Amino acid sequence: MGIRSGTWATYGTLIEQGARLAAEEINAAGGILGAKIELSIRDEAADAVKQARELVEQERVDFIVGIDSSGNAMRVGPIMPELNRILILTHAATHRATEELVYKQGIKHIFRVSVPVYQDGILAAWIAKDLPVKKWAGINPDYEYGRVSWEFFKTTLKKLRPDVEFVSEQWNPSPGTTDFSKWISAVMATDAEGLFTTNWAVEAVTFHKQATELGLYKRLKAVFNPMGYSVDVAYGLGRAYPQLPNGTWVSGRYVWFYPPTDINKRFVDTFVKRWGTLPAYSSETTYTAIYLIKAAIEKTGTLDLDTLIKAMEGMVIVSPAGVRWIRPQDHQAVYEVPYGRISGEVINVGGEMPLLTDIRAVPAFLYYRSPPDYKIPLIE
């Protein structure tokens, strides 16, 4: 289940591509304990709770996988005990899904294999602390993802670099913003040296183009866009992706070249052959979710919900993105995804995409909040 209509419709397709590739591979190898995987695809934009209920009550699915929107994750998650099914999140980034729903409320039916907002806000600050940038501004989407990421970035960076200042924070409506000039102009009226933006998908492409055209990037030293290396953004900007003196820093919940392992190389090659483009992060996370289900069923030999949940808690799975550990307390997958700087080089695989340089990977314990207190590591 992903967003398949509206501004973010591409992301539902990216989720489906990962799911289909995994299902095709597994089915070709004999399925899961001899049973073939069947997929049912739904648009979460058309009332996610209704879609989840119909998937279980009408189509009798055994697992629900995906969900792009943090808001939808927080709406669908609480009904999983009623539906008596496991939900595996592969994109929605709100920390509350695992910190609140799983750990604090005890809804054990929810797992997440993708990185939450720790990657977007906290890890970005660990990179930003080493840059010669003192004054920062933010232009972020005005909903939970944008606000929480910006708050994590500010809190972490201020602790790591007490000399920094935050001179402007702007909030654009999302989804649907096509003209960012109002918020870009507001930042240009300040003496900001660095910018943090969590706009993503087509809005990130539009934002970067307009920021370049209006001259914002001529005034800044660095910019962070945590989801800026999702393939739709990287393909959308291509050679036009702006390069700032101290870096245009981007990441994702997986980046196609990292880690440089055999399993990741095979995944990328297979994905390119099947779909004609490099894999997006939500394709990899959904692909991994299907293999997590396979591992849990083969380990237990059953579809019994309680047995599967216990088996998945603490499970370690080797995936294209690296080794993932499913933290037993809150069902959050722990793994590392790097940031990198947009370079002047491009790769052409299904279209032009800029390559990254100055790759920075940070140990997960430095930026993953953990139970029971969920403080930002080392600084709170």
Image: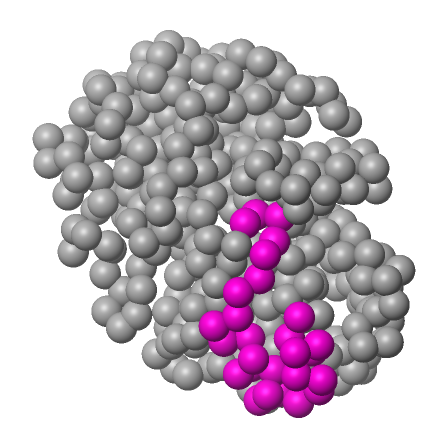
The residue that appears at 72% across and 42% down in the rendered structure is 266
Q: Position of residue 310 (x, y in %)?
A: 53, 83
Q: Position of residue 117 (x, y in %)?
A: 40, 52
Quadrant including the C terminus: bottom left
Task: Name the colour scheme.
Answer: one colour
Q: Is 52 left or right of 60, judged from the image as shown?
A: left
Q: Position of residue 1 (x, y in %)?
A: 69, 62
What's the magenta region?
A: 295-322
Q: Is 213 left or right of 30, judged from the image as shown?
A: left
Tally of numbered tags: 0
Res 142 visible: no
Relative to 75, say whether 215 is above or below: above
Residue 308 falls in which quadrant of the image? bottom right
The residue that appears at 44% across and 29% down in the rendered structure is 359
Q: Nearer the viewer, residue 135 or 5?
A: 135
Q: Residue furthest front?
A: 262
Relative to 142, say whether 31 is above or below: below
Q: Is 355 left or right of 300, judged from the image as shown?
A: left
